[in-house]
Image (cartoon, grey):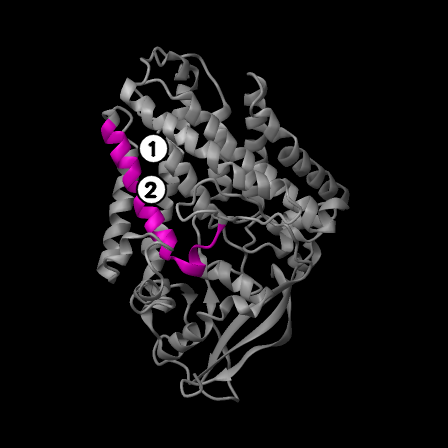
Amino acid sequence: MWHWMSAPDYQAARFAVTHLIALVYLIGFISFLRQFPGLLGERGLTPVARFVERVPFRRAPSLFHFRSSDRWLAGAGWTGAAASLLAQVADFAPVWAWLVLWALLWVLYSSIVNVGQVWYGFGWESLLLEAGFLAIFLGPAHIAPPAPVLWLLCWLLFRVEFGAGLIKLRGDSCWRDLTALYYHHETQPLPGPLSRSFHWLPRPLHKVEVLANHGTQLVVPFLLFAPQPVASVAAMIIIVTQLWLMLSGNFAWLNLLTITLAFAAISGPPAALPDPPGWFAVPVLAVTALFVVLAYWPVRNMLGSGQVMNRSFNRLHLGNTYGAFGSITRVRYEVVVQGAEDLDGPWREYQFKAKPGDPARRPPQVAPYHLRLDWLMWFVAINPSYGRGWLPRFLRALLRNEPQVLALLRHNPFPGEPPKLVKADLYRYRFNSRRDRRETGAHWTRTRSSDLVPPLSLDDL
């Protein structure tokens, strides 16, 4: 009866999609466990307990409305990490057990995102939740993958790619005149080890890269719905493009998750698998109908003149709109935080784990791991209002040597007694040329631009 719903030639695609989503879930939960004490814990910069006191459940549905202690947060994180590992070996679990396991992953991670405040306001958080929700209905390896869910995964990939392509053309003239990559590799949030080399590629090649990006994001997504092997070729083009982006910078798990979705469009030899059980078709068709309804909002957003990036239209983070780098920063500024015993110094610099600081340090590779404080510091350098809710608390934590917050940093220059004063300055950063790199050994040249936060003591705060 339900044979039309089966897609046995996508067995390998289902395997790749589910295992990679489980891997991204694992990275997400590990990131949470390592960073929540300093960001969201009881002594963090924006405690969850304080958030749930003023934001009702209906606006931010989360398990942490019932309890939000550090022990409860850690328990949810460890449960999610364990469930992510279990999902890697759940291929032959009963269908009902598959549903329960993947639903648990989605509930736990959505509970984190919905109370994560500014630290979880990134598009790839909603992307993981939407992909993870669809994975619930892909089913285990001993039944044929349901075709409607594979179509929905391709529709999700279409929104990621086409939405990003549209916002680029509409958002910044440098995408239209093909000069965006004159700046992007140098000014992106967290450059990687190869970003400087990408930045100094010949400018004609940069223009070719932008043209290829437009083709991949504005044309190729439509081919995902073409007959095979065209859809598989389109998916491979997207995968190659995402691998190129992974080499050029650190974008958390955005690239890995986009690659994951592309596998949903790649077919292979049909597997000899039974159709899904009849009862399983009911939730699959219900979810398909739900996403057909939810498609109205992202389609309206993409077709409208006021397109926005990375917007969830409901509290469940389903049927979202996506996009990235609708505008390109031409000049890179960095927030440099320093402490001292008195105004005469010496001023010693705090080092972050991935964002540029010491000019001699090569930018590290951290993706697909996500360093949330480092990302937010990039936004603060562009517009200080991004730090309004947490930057004073961060500076106060430095003046107190609070271990939860200091654990978010790479180096604390005051390991014994905390400083009496802290300040934050803006510096302009430029990638050194190949010759300057050989002569100085430094990857960056930086010059002080202005004060961001003048010297402050605990009494001032």
> Residue 340: horizontal and vertical position, in percent?
47, 83
Q: Which residue is mark 1?
A: 136
Q: Are marks 2 and 1 in contact (CB under 8 Å)?
A: yes
165 horizontally vs 279: left or right: right
Q: Which mark is residue 305?
A: none
Pick the front one: 271 or 202: 271
Q: Quadrant of residue 240?
A: top right
Q: Report the magenta stretch's main SS.
A: helix
Element marked by disc 1:
loop
For the question of whether residue 229 can be seen, the reply is yes
* Residue 69 included in the magenta stretch of the image: no
Among the two numbered marks 2 and 1 on one chain, the one whose residue lies closer to the N terminus: 2
For the question of whether residue 414 can be seen, the reply is no
Q: Which residues are magenta?
A: 96-122
> Residue 378: horizontal and vertical position, in percent?
55, 62
Q: Which mark is residue 106?
A: 2
- Residue at the spot 43% in from the left edge and 58% down from the top edge: 119
* Number of other residues with Cα within 10 Å of mark 1, as a class: few under 14, some 14 to 19, many 20 or more: many
- Label 2 amino acid? Trp
Pick the front one: 281 or 251: 281
Q: Quadrant of the C terminus?
A: bottom left
- Label 1 amino acid? Ile
